[in-house]
Amino acid sequence: MSTQVEGSDGALDLMHRWLEQLAAVRGRAANTIGSYRRDVSGYLGFLNGHRGEPVGRTGLATVTPSEMRSWLASLRADGLSARSTARALSAVKSFHRWLAEAEGIEASAVLAARGPKVKPGLPRPISADAMQAVIDHAELQHPEPWIAARDTAVLTLLYACGLRISEALSLKQSDAPLPEMLRITGKGGKERLVPVLPVARAAVEDYRRRCPHAAGPGDALFLGARGGPLAPTMVQKLMANLRAQLGLPATATPHALRHSFATHLLEAGGDLRTIQTLLGHASLQSTQVYAGIDQARLMEIYDDARAKSRRQRG
């Protein structure tokens, strides 16, 4: 396993300053900061172990191509996927770019390093019929009526508004009743406006009427059984139960509801730019994968039609 940085040395102090700037000036989300900290800390720990001494300012300026190759190889040896390895390299490069700009510490070998090729996979949406079954069966998963209503509201909101699970669970009591346009803070602290369909608003209001816990404006909108904030693991467990009951694939996760929102919107004639805005994607490239899904589905329909035609002729 990669050695983690312990104690305090020049490199670690610089990493903390970089992370503080990302959080304070660039408004990066806490989850993003945490990921950067783990990745860069592991990288610095590797350099410490590789060189047999703590890495300071001078050490950061003298990282060699060989050391970069060894570090990347150690990540793969630890069982890290190509995607996670590429993410770690991206974090390290971001750290070194900041070092060059803020501290004048250049390390060309780091910025020139090439990570593993990551083949972008197509998101796996849930079909419209299966999606309706998911919503219909959500209320049957718990004997307590208010929890059943909560589960239905959460899944309806994820699908109807295309939200990430973290975005839905970060909503506060003060956000309800949900407005026609909901302001969502997504990755990197970026805000976007998302239209709220009446069915989603009604589901949330049904849950709120049934919820027995008193909550203030600053408390979480979605509450757990004991009145605290609802944990993401509970939503994941809910979808796992629904997958088993409905015979859905393992890819039918809470995040798949967001994919389904985008795919079904595209199939209904929505344009990529609008979907990009609704999903909060920083670039259109991230949204274009849904065009790939749509194209793949059209080819399936085409192939099925050809096969049917051949059978009829035969």
Image (cartoon, rainbow, N blue to C red):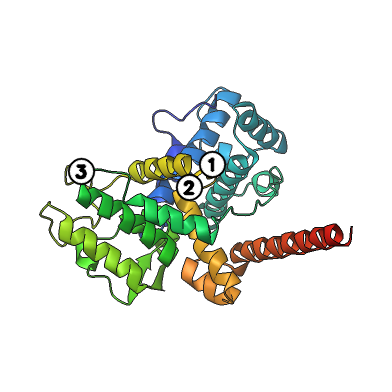
Q: Is residue 26 visible?
A: no
> From this viewpoint, which residue is outermost toward the left?
214
Q: Look at the image and tell me in which quarter the N terminus lies.
A: top right
Residue that carries the numbered disc 1 in the rendered image:
250
Name the amino acid type tagged 3: Ala
Q: Using the image, determine if residue 6 lies above or below residue 136.
A: above
Crowding at mark 3 (Cα within 10 Å: few <14, some 14-19, many 20+): few
Residue that carries the numbered disc 3 in the rendered image:
225
Choose between 120 and 101: the one closer to the eye: 120
Q: Secondary structure at mark 2?
A: loop
Q: Position of residue 180 (x, y in %)?
A: 32, 77
Residue 77, by quadrant, is top right
Q: Secondary structure at mark 1?
A: loop
Q: Position of residue 28 (x, y in %)?
A: 41, 57
Q: Whole-Å distance between the Cαs marked 2 and 3?
A: 22 Å
Q: Using the image, determine if residue 48 lies above or below residue 261.
A: above
Crowding at mark 2 (Cα within 10 Å: few <14, some 14-19, many 20+): many
Residue that carries the numbered disc 2 in the rendered image:
253
272 displayed left or right of 181:
right
Name the amino acid type tagged 1: Ala
Q: Look at the image and tell me in which quarter the C terminus lies.
A: bottom right
